[in-house]
Amino acid sequence: MRDTRESRLLLVLLIVIAFALITIDIRGGEDSPVDGARQAASTVFGPVEKGVSGAVDPVGNAIGAVRDSGTRHDRVSALERENAELKQRLGSDSRNRSRVRQLDTMLQRAGAGQYGIKAAEVIGIGAAQGFSWTVTIDAGTRDGIKRDMTVLNGEGLVGRVTTVGPSSATVLLANDPDFTVGTRLEKTDELGFASGRGDRPLAVQMLNGKAKVKTGDRLVTFGSQADRPFVPGVPVGRVVRVDPSGGDLTRTVYVEPFVGFTKLDLVGIVVQAPRKDPRDAVLPAKPKPQPTPTVTVTATPGGTKPSGAPSGAPSGAPTGAAGAGDGDQE
């Protein structure tokens, strides 16, 4: 529109009319003609506004959903973290319970043998100093550990200390081929020397070639002079095979160790030997044999009939192969 006198007059007139309508609307309230015009306009333009609002709302909902999805993602992430922490805590509790059981069993063994022990944890495995079966423990000279001390756990003999540092030590395991320990057979006191054979049973050379040994017999350590490297009475293992003597001066038996060398965790180093040989006191009690079922036989006037025989068989009639044999004898 051109800037002319007529256009200026028109603009001034429109402004005056607008102020007049505003004044009438304020003074008239709901009964003012302006409000009626507004309602008429709402009636005419309401459907259009609703349609436009319906078109815009999905966009707004989508924006809200994206905003809420971030909150939900944070909540899910927090729950996943809590779940992982709970699983870790449960796993840790299970491991702690297992270690408590190990420690309790080891203390019971040490108490039975009157051994003074220093508990330690296995922190490494592998070859050391040319040995093939060794572990590293987290105890050393600062803890009173010395070379050639006996190492045990709740199951029995683990090995002996070979080298010691300020805070760690190396233990040669009893199943190492370079390992040898004097043994004593339970009850009979027959002596021998056990040697490691890796993942195979220990080979025990019995000094008496005529020694009476049978499968299931158990052995303990015989002990050493000044109780190093081995204190007496520590459980070694159970006999699983006996070679015939063949008239030799010695006899070889094979012993399954009590200790599982591939799953060592907590061990005890004997820092104080017992005042006297505990003999077989450290060995666990043998399991009681299970009673064997027996067959009862009931007597009848016509003969005997084992309980459980077929009801159709006549009383006293021979049954099975035994009856046939009796007939042949006649």
Image: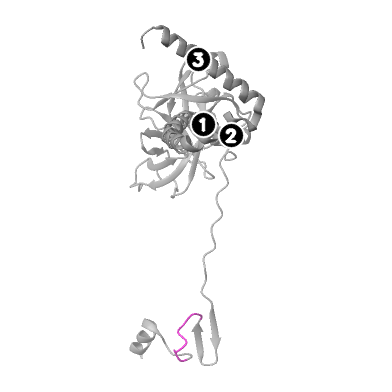
Q: Quadrant of the C terminus?
A: bottom left
Q: Is residue 174 above or below residue 292?
A: above
Mark 3, secondary structure of its residue: helix
Q: Is residue 309 magenta-colored?
A: yes
Most foreground residue, 321 or 90: 90
Earlier-in-chain disc, 2 versus 1: 1
Label disc, if present, on residue 13 of the rendered structure: 3
Name the residue rendered at 55%, 23% in the picture. Answer: 226
Q: Is residue 116 above or below residue 259?
A: above
Residue under numbered circle 1: 75
Prevailing secondary structure class for the magenta stretch in the rendered image: loop
Name the residue rendered at 38%, 28% in the picture. Answer: 133
Earlier-in-chain disc, 1 versus 3: 3
Mark 1, secondary structure of its residue: helix
Q: Position of residue 265 (x, y in %)?
A: 49, 30
- Left or right placement of residue 24 versus residue 292 in this view: right
Marks 3,2: beta carbons within 8 A: no
Marks 2,1: beta carbons within 8 A: no
Circle 1 Cα neighbour tier, 10 Å, few/some/many (<14 / 14–19 / ≥20): few
Q: Quadrant of the N terminus?
A: top left
Residue under numbered circle 2: 100
Mark 3 to mark 2 CA distance (whole Å): 98 Å
Query: Magenta stretch?
Result: 307-314
Circle 2 Cα neighbour tier, 10 Å, few/some/many (<14 / 14–19 / ≥20): few
Q: How many marks?
A: 3
